Image (tube, helix red, strand yellow):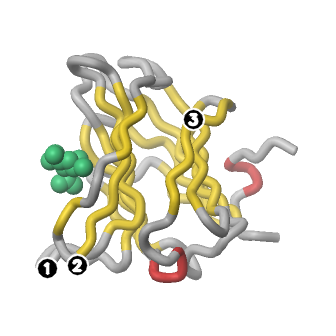
Amino acid sequence: SPMSVANAKHTVLNPVTPYTGPIPGGLHPGEIIIIQGTVPPDADRFQIDLSSGSSTKPRSDVALHFSPRFQGSPCVVCNSLLQESWGKEETLHQLPYKCGAPFETIILVHDDAFKVAVNGSHLLEYKHRIPVNRVDTFSISGNVRVHAIGYIPNS
Ligand code: 9QG
């Protein structure tokens, strides 16, 4: 059945960006994060990061860096940051976001991968490089307005 922010156990409304906050209870397989927002006109890029802690110095490991890019050849770049180094990028040359338009992004946590859907359609899968049980922090930054972040627990 379709998931919406109405199903969320915890919701963060209209956060100021860049936003970083705790994922309530940490992240577990079966859980879902819903992000509703709007891409401003003339956006270059924004990014969603699921991290292990919120340290900036040294920078915390990022399990999922999800980066829609609007300039040049439109794409979505995913990667992980481990011990302050980026790994190999996984780039999808497809961009379901539109400058000036609202969106809904759903991140589903599976045992082996994150699955990301945008506006009701599956977009990509990203295999875990960092154990999900280390992820406890959500960030969103760049050219984006955020209306709501919802956390839906695994039943
Ligand atoms: O550019 O690519 C993802 O592979 C880098 C960017 C970096 C990431 C990375 O500079 O930018 O997108 O968190 C970061 O440092 C973001 C904002 C090869």
Q: First in sequence, mark 1 or 3: give its number.
A: 1
Q: Which residue is mark 3?
A: 123
Q: Residue furthest left?
A: 57
Q: Nearer the viewer, residue 57 or 79?
A: 79
Q: Which mark is on residue 58?
A: 1
Residue occupying the point 70% across, 59% down: 8
- Secondary structure at badge 1 equals loop
How many marks are shown on the rendered structure? 3
The answer to whether residue 3 is above or below residue 137 is: above
Q: Position of residue 105 (x, y in %)?
A: 55, 40
Residue 97 placement: quadrant: top left
Q: Quadrant of the N terminus?
A: top right
Residue occupying the point 45% across, 20% down: 101
Q: Position of residue 46 (x, y in %)?
A: 30, 39
Which of discs 1 and 3 lies nearer the camera? The answer is: 3
Task: Please tell me how crowded label 2 is: few (under 14), some (14-19), or many (20+) other residues with Cα within 10 Å.
Answer: few
Residue 102 in the figure: left or right of residue 79 = right
Mark 1 residue type: Pro
The answer to whether residue 10 is above or below residue 42 is: below
Q: Which mark is on residue 55?
A: 2
For the residues labelled 1 and 3, the Cα–Cα distance comes to: 32 Å
For the residues labelled 1 and 2, the Cα–Cα distance comes to: 6 Å
The answer to whether residue 126 is above or below residue 135 is: above
For the residues labelled 2 and 3, the Cα–Cα distance comes to: 29 Å
Which of discs 1 and 2 lies nearer the camera? The answer is: 1
Q: Residue furthest right?
A: 1
